[in-house]
Structures are given as C-alpha cells and as structure tokens.
Amino acid sequence: MYQKLYKHALEAWKKIIDGDYYNDQSNTTLEFSIKSLKGSEYEDKLRRLILLSIPKLANDILNSDPPLPFIFILLSLNDPKVGRPLEKLFIDHWIKDNASQNATFHLLNLLNILGDKNVDIIPIVKNILSHANTQMDPIMINALAVMTINNQPGTLKYFIEKFAEWAENDNDVFLKDLIKMVGKKGLMELLKTQKTKAINKILKK
C-alpha cells in the first residue's frame, strides 16, 4: 500500500515541479500521500525528494502571490525538517532584498500561514529580528512588526526589545513609530526592558 501511495506522490510532485502549481488533483494527491506515508519507510524518502527540489523552485516560490498551494501543504505538516528550510528561504530572501516591500510581503505570508497552522512563530520572529538592522526601510520593518503583532500578540515583546536596543544606540525612529501604532501595550513592554535611554526618548517625545 505504501509503495503505491509513494508512487502517486511522486507523480503528483513531478507535475507540480514541472510548473503545474495550481492543479487541484496533484495538490490533493500530494497532501493525502504525504499524510498517509507518515511513519512509513517512504516518509523520509519523499521528504528528501521534495527538499531537493525547493532550491530549483525558489524563484517561483518567492514571486508568487498568493503563495503556491504546495507551500500551504508543506507548512501544514508541522514538520520542522520541511518547515525550517522553507523558513530559511523566505528569511534569506528578505535579508538579501534588504526588507523590500516584496520580500516583506512574502515573509508576512509565511508567518500568517504558520500562525494559522498553530505553529509557534516566536522562534522565527526572533530569528528574523536577529538579522534586522537600522539600514532597512523603517516603513517595511514597522509593517512587518505591526501586522505580525496584530496576528500574534505574543510577538510584541520581541519587536519592542529589538527597537529599544536600536533606540539605545541613537536610532529611535523604529521604536517611536511602533509605539504610535500599538499604543499603551507597547509602552508597557518598553518599560519592562529597563532600557533607560530608549524609555526617556519615548516619554519625552
């Protein structure tokens, strides 16, 4: 039975990577096969095959609006071995493109998909922020912050901490803009950071 499912999965995946991204039958077959092969000897074989294809599909993945259906399927598996390479793809693109509007939009899509699948996005947000810098577009950085916070309020703390760190180093535009957008909740989180210089800049504005 597993061998037959694996064969169907391969056929469906081949159609998808050949560019037939929106073929409902192929996507449905792929999703069903992946879930049915879980725990079998074919699970890892199929995973490796899919991951080997991702770099070749990177351009289409990163330039598709809305995200390609198979991205939803792969992320819905909640499988870190699949999720992390995809996360890396989107984050690397965002860094390389210096937080451009397009890259930020796709990163937000990724976070929204993962959030909808009840994946803990806080480690991903912390990873993103570790690569963020003050040379990036403040409008895009704050769009990323506000939209992520709106969907996942637990991420507020991490954006405030990062922006307060920048304010301590004399770049307070990101922090001021975020506090304006999120209001009292943001200010309360800022006070918890105990970053005196950043706090004074906000309170004396």
Image: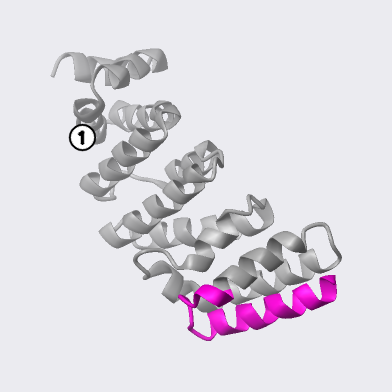
User: Residue 98 is drawn in which quadrant?
Assistant: bottom left
Q: Nearer the viewer, residue 141 or 62?
A: 62
Residue 27: give x, y in percent of width and height.
Answer: 56, 71
- 44 relative position to 122: left or right: right
Residue 4 part of the magenta-drawn span: yes
Residue 10: give x, y in percent of width and height.
Answer: 69, 79
Q: Nearer the viewer, residue 152 or 117?
A: 117
Please tell me which residue is depicted at 65% across the width and 72% down the height of the picture. Answer: 50
Q: Is residue 72 above or below residue 124?
A: below
Please tell me which residue is depicted at 66% across the width and 51% down the height of the picture. Answer: 80
The residue beneath circle 1 is: 173
Residue 63: give x, y in percent of width and height.
Answer: 37, 70
Q: Which residues are magenta?
A: 1-26
Please tell me which residue is depicted at 33% across the width and 54% down the height of the picture. Answer: 104
Q: Is residue 200 above or below residue 139?
A: above
The local crowd at label 1, few if under 14, some if 14 to 19, many if 20 or more residues have their Cα within 10 Å, is some
Report the coloring of the rendering: one colour
> Which secondary structure type mostly characterizes the magenta part of the structure?
helix
- 105 relative position to 123: left or right: left
